Amino acid sequence: MKIGLDTAPAALRGTYFQHLASVLARYAPEHEYIIGAERYGHLDLYHGFRSSLPLSVHLGRIPAVMTVPNLDFLRYPHLYTFSERLIALRLYRRALRQARRGITVSALPALWESLKRGLRRTRQRLRIDPAKIEVMMPLAARMPQEPPLQAELEHTRRKYGLPEMFILMIGTVEPHHNHEAVLDALALLDSRVGVVVCGRRTVYSDFLLSYARERHLATRVDFIYELTPADLPALFRMARVFAYLPDACSEASIVPVVEALRAELPMVLSDTRLNREAAGHAAAYVNPEVPGEVVAALENALCDESWRQTMRRRERRRAELFSEYAVAERLVQIYTSL
């Protein structure tokens, strides 16, 4: 079977899509995988990752599956203009109507489960048949088998101006991820500790910078708005702790958690169902709204070597659940079921 994978935006070429194609080719070599395949006329299946499917796929009646990246425009409408929400809604409706299957990569399982249980309002707005939805584990960034060399670490540190000891936060920089809770805790931690926030620049990230300045923490907080994907392993290797504190009601992606698991980086996570499903017993859990919990957990994660070693062993075992083989196997099951 010849399977076409969506073209990637320029910033993603050579990263996620090539990674996915190489994983599929490694574990399911009986099929052919082509990136940017809407440019070709002879496909047995097309896998899209955007909010719309190419016209050539529709006109050619090529069977298609669609990975739904996010539905934040429904969950957090206040973050989008009316026209942005309207356009996104129309695009998703059309694409999901055309696709044989819609795949959610665990960033939105709670929402899709709600759809399947019959939440009428959301289902009616998307106009989607819940039976078409497939849920699968995410494909995290590939971590090298051998840790980065010291020279690579120092190059990455200089490139982004990183401190010697820091708490890493990766993911969407929006209010429901509770970055403020970590910055508040930072004021009570060892002055040598910094925080590195990695994610696309947003209005909220600008607010966080002002928030840090008001609390005289600006010199201890660094923002990486554009991360070179190849630098991610070094970033995980240099970080002392990974903090990820989305609200329980948010449909946050677990991809950052899986990446931290695979990097064996000790984690402090918000106590949500999604985080616990991802990390199990391989993390410390806190309520972001209770400052004392956040401070205590971060301080312990930074300083308690016995706890850190225990977490690393647990992470190593837990990461096996999100192996590349499991991702490839699940995707091929979906492909061949059409």
Image (tube, rainbow, N blue to C red):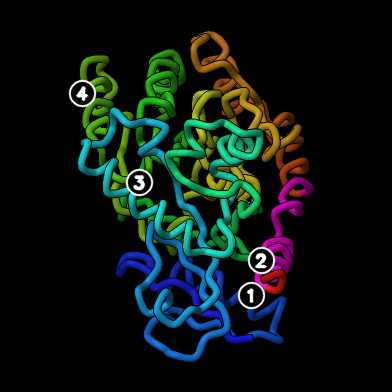
Q: From the viewer's perspective, is residue 199 above or below residue 205? A: below
Residue that mark 4 sits on: 210
- Kindly report the distance in space between the C-alpha atoms of the residues bearing marks 2 and 3: 26 Å
Name the amino acid type tagged 2: Leu
What is the C-alpha distance between the residues marked 2 and 1?
8 Å
| Distance from the alpha carbon under mark 4 to that under mark 1 | 44 Å
Sequence-first disc among 3 and 1: 1
Q: Which residues are magenta?
A: 317-335
Residue for badge 1: 24
Identify the mark nearer the N-term, 4 or 1.
1
Residue 126: image x %, image y %? 45, 44
Q: For the residue labelled by badge 2, is the local secondary structure a helix, a strand or a loop? A: helix
| Towards the viewer: 171 or 236 | 171
Name the mark on residue 331.
2
Q: Position of residue 335 (x, y in %)?
A: 65, 71
Q: Earlier in the sequence, mark 2 or mark 1?
A: 1
Asked which quadrant contains residue 116, the reply is top right
Q: Residues within 10 Å of mark 1 (few under 14, many from 20)?
A: many
Residue 89: numbered disc: 3
Amino acid type for the residue under numbered disc 4: Ser
Q: Is residue 58 left or right of residue 252?
A: left
